[in-house]
Amino acid sequence: MSQNSDQFAAFRHSSYQRYFVARFLTAFSFHAISTAIGWHIWVETENPFWLGMIGLVQFLPALLLVLVTGLVTDRYSRRIVMASAIIGMATGSLCLTIMAGSGPFNPIWVMAVLAGFGVARAFHSPASASLVVNLVPKKDFQNAIGWITSSWQLASIFGPVAGGLLAAYSRTAPYLCAAILMCLSAGLILSIAKPAQAISKKKIDIGVLLGGFKYIWKTKIVLGAITLDLFAVMLGGVVALMPIFAKEILGMGPSGLGWLRAAPGIGAIAVVIWMTRFPIKDHAGLILLGAVALFGAATALFGFSTSIWLSLFALFLVGALDMVSVIIREVLLQLWTPDEVRGRVNAVNSIFLMASNELGEARAGFFAAKWGAIVTVIGGGIAAIGVTALCGMFFPQLRKVRQLDKVD
């Protein structure tokens, strides 16, 4: 690795500055809501099944709408699509505020609102991922990806802490604050000057609708990278079970849960700071595979731990190692995808990402209901290591990737 001459290159562009802040506010709000919802649902039901359902009901809309969301992102202004989706999430936050102020949550109605969140996020994910490419020149793109990923991770640090503290203070506070911040985020996106965008004008047919799937399938390096992320995070994810670890195993309250949720983000930020200064120059594929294998090991360590400090350290490593794979995967995906099909490709990628996260949370909740949280987390970490070995075997092209800015 060599030192980057301009660590803040992406921030030389004013549109990117607004986009960065907007992405942070949206992600901060989402993490605050997720922490508060997880805590309230666990305290009121003490049933891991409902913790799993939180992820599942948000994933299904993205899966069902994948052909629509990608096409909309390629056919219409990504800036407008992104802002509209954020407004939809703000509306859901207001609904949760009203429900929280009316007494104990009815899990069925909470899941209905979260399904609405899932619809909004299904449009937000491909639009936001595709828009950033239109805001900076190609030479600054790896830097932009590093920093925009850091905005999510900063939010994953401060959002859960804020969500936990606000949930301890008031049932309604986390959801009302999230609604306000999301409205501010939408305003920032709408204030960005209309960027250049290659609009797809092909007649809509099955080939156009499936354009994202076709591109990913034929580009084996990209397919291998997102497949690796999908199964490793789906099997090794621990977020859904953190309320159980916080309350039952580590003896922590909602504010302690916030710190558990924040620890992976702190690790990720440390990696972002390093990689924006010293970007990956060689052996990117091997670094990716090594990072994911160690991610699985860190997950298993968290499952074994009964110490608050060891648990926080393990989660720090989980976030740091995951961030290495996120940056490599996103650069591979975004930099080498044609702009006119980028929305559809990102819609497919968002399905992989949401499956790894939301569907992974559902898997964790359902498995924990049958075998317990500790066995679920340890087994998931070991399985993530196995997935890494399999992906290295079945996708030799990924293993051989060396330079991120020169993919063969």
Image: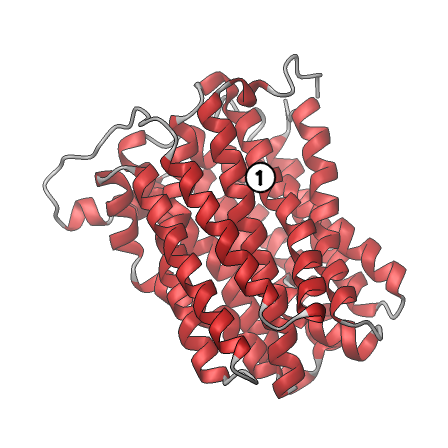
Please say if 296 is above or below 267: below
**Hey, which quadrant is residue 31 in on the image?**
bottom right
Please say if 111 is above or below 311: below
Disc 1 packing (10 Å; few <14; some 14–19; many ≥20): many
**Hey, which quadrant is residue 259 in on the image?**
bottom right
**Hey, which quadrant is residue 357 in on the image?**
bottom right
Tell me which residue sits at (68%, 74%) in the image: 376
| Foreground of the two, 386 or 156 | 156
- Figure label count: 1
Q: Position of residue 53 (x, y in %)?
A: 50, 76
Q: Is residue 397 visible?
A: no
Q: Position of residue 67 (x, y in %)?
A: 26, 54
Q: Secondary structure at mark 1?
A: helix
| Foreground of the two, 286 or 273 | 273
Q: Position of residue 43 (x, y in %)?
A: 67, 82
Please say if 113 is above or below 334: below
Tell me which residue sits at (84%, 75%) in the image: 251
Which residue has dot 1 on it? 149
Tell me which residue sits at (54%, 37%) in the image: 21
Which residue reaches farthest top?
Answer: 5
| Foreground of the two, 25 or 210 | 25
Q: Position of residue 129 (x, y in %)?
A: 43, 40
**Quarter occupied by the C terminus:** top left
Left or right of 133? Residue 275 is: right
| Foreground of the two, 172 or 78 | 172
Coloring scheme of the render?
A: secondary structure
Q: Is residue 211 visible?
A: yes
**Quarter occupied by the N terminus:** top right
Amino acid type of the residue tagged 1 in the rendering: Thr
